[in-house]
Amino acid sequence: MEWLTKMNAAIDYIETHLTEDIHFDIVAMNAGCSSYNFQRMFSFITDIPLAEYIRRRRLTQAALELQNTDQKVIDVAIKYGYDSATSFTRAFKTLHGLTPTEARQEGVILKAYPKISFQISIKGDQEMNYRIETKEAFDVFGIETICSLTNEEGRLTPAQLWKQCQQNGEYERLYANSGKLPDYVAKNLCKIHGVENYRTTDDNTFAYMLCAFCSKDSKTKGYQIAHIPAQTYAIFPSETFHWDEDFHTVLTTLQKRFYTEWLPTADYNRADGPNFEIYGGTPESGYIELWYPIVRK
């Protein structure tokens, strides 16, 4: 299948260039999508960021070379992208639990992270509800953070932004300023949602916003405003769940199923545009709709 061929081509590119600088935009080009889309897709499918996968593969190969060759530690370190023996030793010990020098001893236990291969897993035991809708352009406004695709320290995750805003009162303030839901939005929805990838940011980052839909009585002063162009979406609704008990599991499961079950077999590609987490329900129980922008193959 085309999707599998492209994803495995991206992995082959990584494997061929483990001892070189790997540019994520080139990796993504092999998969036929943007760097953002590939990194988000990769992390949802594998449960690790792309940068962490590459780090593990490099340190796996480095361990094999230390065991099977007489190369100096510093030479192996430089080969796999480390500028000093100290930084290499630190990373090596974090992954393997022992130093590069100790790795050369007979009988020691090392960790091996094999090359990933993407395949289709035939399940069919649980249906996946979805609908395709084309929506006209609209605007949203809210509280923004710039998130890291590589787990860079010092940047909030979407979940951390939600928690911070709920603790410091910004969520309630945005709710009060949101105004009435516009006519193009179902009236049983919450007023605050999540949107990401709605504007260009630096490499290996993406914009994420707690947002409200702009309407004629919204108070947008002081907030980030984003224009969302007309777009066709694949929309995936969840079952009703309890916010406190099941929210994270329901959200991540729905995200993962889109990338691992629906997208590989659909007649659509994931478009490079903003995607939404749309929330509805009551303070006790709720549901989620994930809106992914798509284009026909």
Image: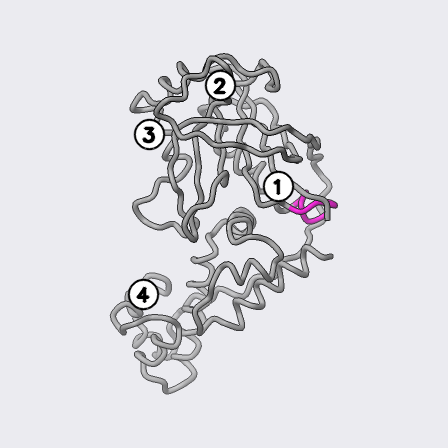
- Distance, label 3 to label 2, CA atoms, is 18 Å
Mark 1 — residue? Answer: 257
Whichever of labels 1 and 2 marks the residue nearer the N terminus, that label is: 2
Whichever of labels 3 and 2 marks the residue nearer the N terminus, that label is: 3
Mark 4 — residue? Answer: 93
Q: Which residues are magenta?
A: 261-269
Image x and y of residue 169, in percent: 31, 20
Helix, strand or loop for disc 4: helix
**Residue type indicated by callout 2:** Lys
Q: Residue at x 38, y 50 (%)?
A: 151
**Residue type indicated by callout 3:** Gln
Helix, strand or loop for disc 1: helix
**Dots 1, 3 in contact, CB < 8 A:** no
Q: Which circle marks residue 191 in the picture? A: 2
- Distance, label 1 to label 2, CA atoms, is 26 Å
Mark 3 — residue? Answer: 164
From what the image shows, is residue 258 above or below residue 239? below
From the image, state whether disc 1 or disc 2 is nearer to you. 2
